[in-house]
Amino acid sequence: MSMGSDTSWVGKKPLRRLGGMFDALSIAVEIGFFVNPPPSQEDKNVAHLTYVSEMVKKCETSARITAI
């Protein structure tokens, strides 16, 4: 059995790019790791709003402290 002797793929484009995040996550699931699905756009928006509101609170607190 000769490895790598099949040259029928030479000169052809792959059907899709290999080695991306999807492939890595698929392999991880296949070997038994639990992988959370990526957050939705809505989750990202909520996280951003939470971050911004926390920063606003910190800025307001800092302004009150420095005004004293």
Image (cartoon, grey):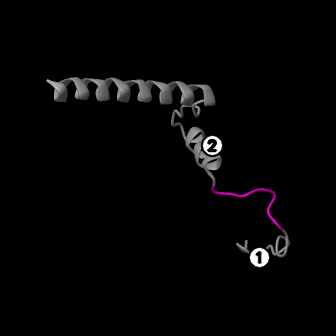
Q: Secondary structure at mark 2?
A: helix
- Describe residue 33's horizontal placement relative to residue 67 as left or right: right
Image coordinates of residue 21 in percent, x first then y, are 60, 48
Q: Locate residue 53: give its quadrant.
A: top left
The label number, if any, that marks residue 68 in the structure image? none
Q: Residue at x 77, y 56 (%)?
A: 16
Pick the quarter of the image with the N terminus. bottom right
- At 60% across and 46% down in the image, what residue appears? 27
Q: Which contiguous range is marked in magenta?
A: 13-19
Disc 2 designates what residue?
26
Residue 10 picture location, percent across and down: 82, 75
Q: CA distance from mark 2 to mark 1?
A: 28 Å
Secondary structure mostly seen in magenta is loop
Which quadrant of the figure has residue 56?
A: top left
In-front residue for pair 40/15 = 40
Would you place residue 15 above or below residue 43 in this image?
below
Q: Nearer the viewer, residue 23 or 42?
A: 42
Q: Name which of mark 2 and mark 1 comes first in the sequence.
A: 1
Q: Is residue 42 magenta?
A: no
Mark 2: which amino acid?
Answer: Ser
- Give x and y (percent) for residue 9: 83, 70
Which of the pair 67/39 is nearer the observer? 67
Q: Is residue 25 above or below residue 46?
A: below
Horizontal relation, residue 1 to residue 68: left or right: right
Numbered-mark total: 2
- Please report the residue visible at 84 percent of the width from the left and 75 percent of the height from the top: 11
- Classify mark 2: residues with Cα within 10 Å, few (<14), some (14-19) or many (20+): few
Find out whether the residues at labels 2 and 1 contact each other: C-beta distance under 8 Å. no
Q: Mark 1 — residue?
A: 5
Report the side of 63 relative to 5 (left or right): left
Foreground of the two, 49 or 18: 49
